[in-house]
Image (cartoon, grey):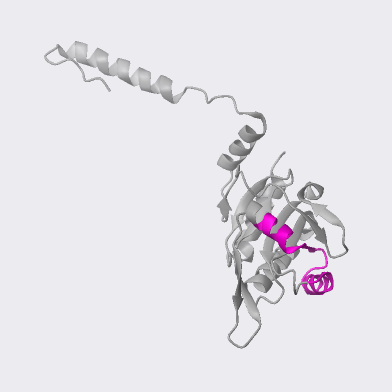
Amino acid sequence: MTQPPQGQPSRRIATWLLAALAALSLQACKPAASPNSTAGTASQVAEAAHFNAVDITGAEYARKLQLKDVDGKPRSLDEFKGKVVFLFFGYTQCPDVCPTTMADLAAVRKKLGADGDRVQGVFVTVDPARDTPAVLKSYLASMDPSFVGLHGSPAEIDAAAKEFKVFYQKVEGREGGYTIDHTAGAFVFDPQGHVRLFVRYGMGVEPLAADLKQLLAAKP
């Protein structure tokens, strides 16, 4: 900011101060640039919302998914529009993270009452060798019959994981068998099909329910 002239009468300084304040006021009141169609709307909604999960609105990944369900039917994210989608990469023999995450989601759906019917859980296996369609179907049905299980070839799972920036790696056991290290978080899409949140493992039922309720209530 330009400094006031030195050695000038007090009236000159007062005039300068008033002019500076006026300029600042005009700058503060300057209207924001017109938003772009989809991106602008998403950013405006993001500014108005306050989530417990990590807000990733506008992310340039996690945009597409093409795998088969337990009945062999090709599924994509587009067909879930109109619902809030909670998408998680895991495997059925996971000892803690996976069952806890999906059980929490089942509890959230119940907590939301009628709105829970507009929340779709999607489980993508990172262990296609052991997670056959029959295994996936039984595993998810025991938690919530509405959950959709997706699987594919190792190459298809790799492609899906890269699209979502999800890490997974087989860890051989000392006495045979193996476990899988994998990203523990989940992705949430709004009813318009835009990825909005990354949910860290262990966030809890109440905070997650609050976030999903916001997305369900938001206007398109």
Residue shown at 59%/75% (left/top)?
171
Does the stretch in magenta take in 193?
no
Residue for point 42% across, 19% down = 26
Can residue 6 be seen here? The reply is yes
Depth check: give the residue in front, 55 or 213: 55
Position of residue 154 measured from the top left corner of the image (x, y, whole percent) = 72, 63
Count of numbered labels shown in the rendering: 0
* Residue 112 seen anywhere in this rendered image of the structure: no
Nearer to us in this view, 46 or 167:
167
Q: Which residues are magenta?
A: 132-161
Quadrant for residue 129, please give it: bottom right
Q: Position of residue 147 (x, y in %)?
A: 79, 64
Q: Is 134 left or right of 52, judged from the image as shown?
A: right
| Magenta-drawn stretch contains 142 | yes
Q: Point out the residue furthest to the left here.
A: 7
Whole-percent x, y for residue 9 in the image:
14, 11
Farthest residue to the front: give it: 155
Q: Position of residue 172 (x, y in %)?
A: 60, 79
Residue nearest the viewer, comparing 11 with 207: 207
Camera-side residue of 1 and 164: 164
Query: Is 92 above or below relative to 19?
Result: below
Q: Residue at x 61, y 32 (%)?
A: 40
Instruction: Decide: is 97 above or below 174.
Output: above
**Quadrant location of the C terminus?**
top right
In the displayed structure image, the side of residue 106 where residue 44 appears, left or right: left
Residue 67 placement: quadrant: bottom right
For the N terminus, the quadrant is: top left
